[in-house]
Amino acid sequence: MAVASDAARARAPRGSAKTRALEYVKDAILTGGFRGGDLISEGEVAAALDMSRTPVREAFLRLEAEGLLRLYPQRGALVVPVSPEEVRAVMEARLVIEQFAARSACHGDDAARARIGDGLDAQLDRQRAAADDLRGFLDADRAFHTVLVEAAGNAILADVYSSLRDRQLRMIGESAVRDPRRTATIVEEHTVIAAAVRAGDLDALLDAVRAHLSGTVMALGLAVGTPGPLTVD
């Protein structure tokens, strides 16, 4: 049976028992504390949060409905692995949106690009400061990309991007668990993206975005380009 980290326990929110159990388990799944294929039990979660099994059972049912758990009576709950098809679908959607945002950023004037660059640098600083806090790092990672996407001024694409939040957190979290060097690499890749925005170098920015998303795919143990996400022009 899998057990979440002390850090995950510390992040368990206040509120109703069901809410606490739901957020605790979901946070552990999204940040790699509970990984795909792990079997978790109501009893372990209840003990970790010092509560009865009833709210944990309710939380498990909610997470099963969200597709994160698969329940097995008398055995526990299986954390549903992220499939290769889901990874590629999410990354392909991100690439389309982020390349659109990159073009919009580079079409702006120097002042506009500087404002975007300042926003990106602020999230880079958060990521560097969160080196030992994976959840904080992941929140800053998402905020970094959101700065670029929202700067494009397309509310519909921004909403679609926002809807990918949980999937993005989970995939990036799992990539970081698989490859402990991934967080440092992400910071390096983000630094290149921010510099290309400031310079207004569209070719360099598109290349940096593709390389960054491809890095996550490869860190998850998948080949790039079979089929062909991350090659959209």
Image (cartoon, rainbow, N blue to C red):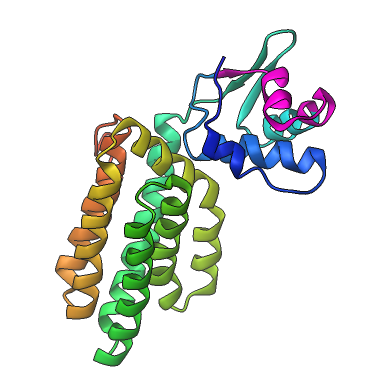
Residue 17: horizontal and vertical position, in percent? 81, 39
Residue 138: horizontal and vertical position, in percent? 43, 51
- Camera-side residue of 22 and 166: 22
Q: Is residue 206 magenta?
A: no
Identify the residue at image location x=43%, y=45%.
Answer: 134
In-image side of 98 versus 62 (left or right)? left
Q: So how many labels did they put on this image? A: 0
Is residue 5 among what the camera can see? yes
- Camera-side residue of 26 and 159: 26
Magenta segment, which residues?
A: 39-57
In-image side of 7 versus 222 (left or right)? right
Which residue of the protein is positioned furthest toward the top in this rendering? 74
Residue 91, placed above or below residue 44 = below
- Camera-side residue of 117 and 44: 44
Q: Is residue 42 magenta?
A: yes
Residue 195, placed above or below residue 178 = below
Residue 74, placed above or below residue 162 = above
